[in-house]
Image (cartoon, rainbow, N blue to C red):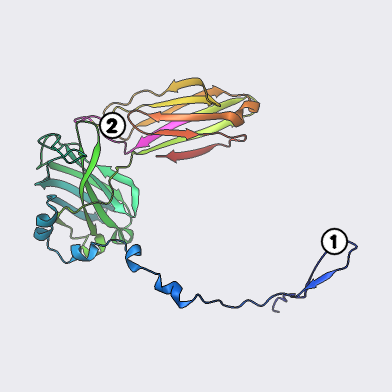
């Protein structure tokens, strides 16, 4: 049998007082005046005002228009091992670096590297090594993405060329994006594509994976620094030498500092190191942990009055 819905009038009032009966109101559609729609400006909601222009240009025309150079790469899906193979081969005719005020060149050549990801996922990205002082870098580096074939066909391959300058700044030179639905991934292929301007002016700083656990009976806060990934390069030739510093802060006062070991020549360090801080339960609410990566971001994480065990990835 069908359920019954009771829509009798609702009664409101103070106990013992005269009751007031309120009838349910009938919902009616409301329409905005025509003037409301006249204020809509489609240009404000455009995803990319230049996308139509770019689609109509050949690679040669885009090189001439933007003068950002070209990138040579390949892609192929390995059905036996269920992963996508992306090779970053080389780039040519990259523009020379300029200072932020545009008044002069910082140096004669760039120090480029390439970041690779499969949109919309930008977290599991890869990056090549830095090639020093060249506008025509040769990478010849191979990367794999473990992803089902049907899912790979729904992704867009994005390659950003980034300049790591002498001031340790990471400036995006340009990008190449290619929907993998347009490609025969089983057969694979390689392409020269013109770099176009990227709206991503800042490069992501990477991620830190950690866990927290508080033992109320012992008044002890345990911190596990598990790993970090895709940290920024801090050395031209060897990558980063990252470590993590953990600081316990009570209010505005620094109470204790501890540090992981330093991992040499890697941007994807594994630590698996544990630390313990004495924090009485009555002080936990005013305590904070600050995680600082070498030449990277700072993470602030308040444990709070009740801190269950959890894993947290912060960037």
Q: Residues within 10 Å of mark 2 (few under 14, many from 20)?
A: some
Q: Which residues are magenta?
A: 224-238
Q: Rounded to the nearest whole Å, what is the CA distance between mark 1 and mark 2?
A: 70 Å
Name the residue rendered at 88%, 67% in the picture.
18
Q: Residues within 10 Å of mark 1 (few under 14, many from 20)?
A: few
Instruction: Give the image quarter of residue 55.
Output: bottom left
Is 203 situated left or right of 137 in this image?
Answer: right
Is 220 situated left or right of 290 in this image?
Answer: right
Is 227 in the magenta? yes
Is 25 in the magenta? no
Numbered mark located on residue 71 in the image: none
Q: Quadrant of the N terminus?
A: bottom right
Most distant residue in the front direction: 35
- Residue named by callout 2: 266
The count of marks equals 2
Name the residue rendered at 59%, 29% in the picture.
286
Q: For this rendering, which residue is in front, 24 or 128?
A: 24
Q: Nearer the viewer, mark 1 or mark 2?
A: 1
Q: Check the image and report above or below for 212 versus 15.
A: above
Name the residue rendered at 27%, 44% in the picture.
126
Of mark 1 and mark 2, the one earlier in the sequence is 1
Q: Quadrant of the C terminus?
A: top left
Q: Secondary structure at mark 1?
A: loop
Q: For this rendering, which residue is in front, 189 or 195?
A: 195
- Residue named by callout 1: 14
Q: For this rendering, which residue is in front, 120 or 93?
A: 93
Q: Check the image and report above or below for 259 versus 32.
A: above
Q: Of helix, strand and loop, which mostly describes the magenta segment? A: loop
Residue 228, percent from left and from top: 37, 35
Residue 143, percent from left and from top: 23, 45
């Amino acid at each position: 049998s069908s359920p019954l819905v009771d829509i009798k009038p609702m009664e409101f009032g103070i106990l013992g007082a005269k009751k007031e009966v309120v009838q349910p109101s009938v919902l009616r559609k409301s329409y905005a005046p025509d003037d409301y729609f006249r204020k809509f400006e489609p240009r404000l909601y455009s995803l990319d005002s230049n996308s139509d222009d770019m689609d109509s240009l050949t690679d040669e025309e885009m090189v001439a228009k933007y003068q950002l150079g070209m990138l040579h790469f390949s892609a192929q899906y390995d059905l036996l091992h269920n992963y996508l193979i992306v090779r970053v081969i080389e780039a040519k005719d990259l523009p020379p670096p300029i200072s932020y005020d545009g008044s002069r060149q910082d140096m004669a050549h760039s120090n480029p590297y390439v970041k690779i990801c499969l949109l919309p996922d930008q977290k599991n990205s890869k990056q090549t090594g830095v090639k020093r002082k060249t506008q025509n870098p040769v990478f010849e580096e191979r990367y794999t993405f473990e992803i089902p074939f049907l899912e790979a066909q729904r992704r867009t391959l994005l390659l950003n060329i980034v300049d790591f300058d002498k001031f340790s700044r990471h400036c995006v030179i340009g990008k190449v994006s290619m929907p993998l639905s347009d490609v025969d991934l089983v057969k694979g292929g390689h392409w020269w594509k013109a770099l176009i301007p990227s709206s991503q002016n800042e490069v992501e700083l990477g991620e830190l994976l950690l866990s927290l656990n508080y033992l109320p009976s012992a008044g002890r806060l345990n911190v596990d620094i598990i790993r970090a990934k895709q940290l920024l390069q801090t050395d031209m030739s060897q990558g980063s030498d990252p470590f993590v510093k953990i600081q316990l802060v009570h209010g505005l006062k620094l109470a204790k500092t501890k540090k992981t070991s330093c991992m040499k020549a890697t941007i994807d360090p594994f630590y698996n190191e544990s630390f313990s801080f004495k924090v009485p339960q009555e002080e936990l609410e005013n305590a904070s942990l600050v995680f600082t990566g070498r030449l990277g971001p700072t993470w602030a994480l308040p444990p709070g009055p009740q801190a269950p065990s959890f894993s947290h990835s912060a960037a």
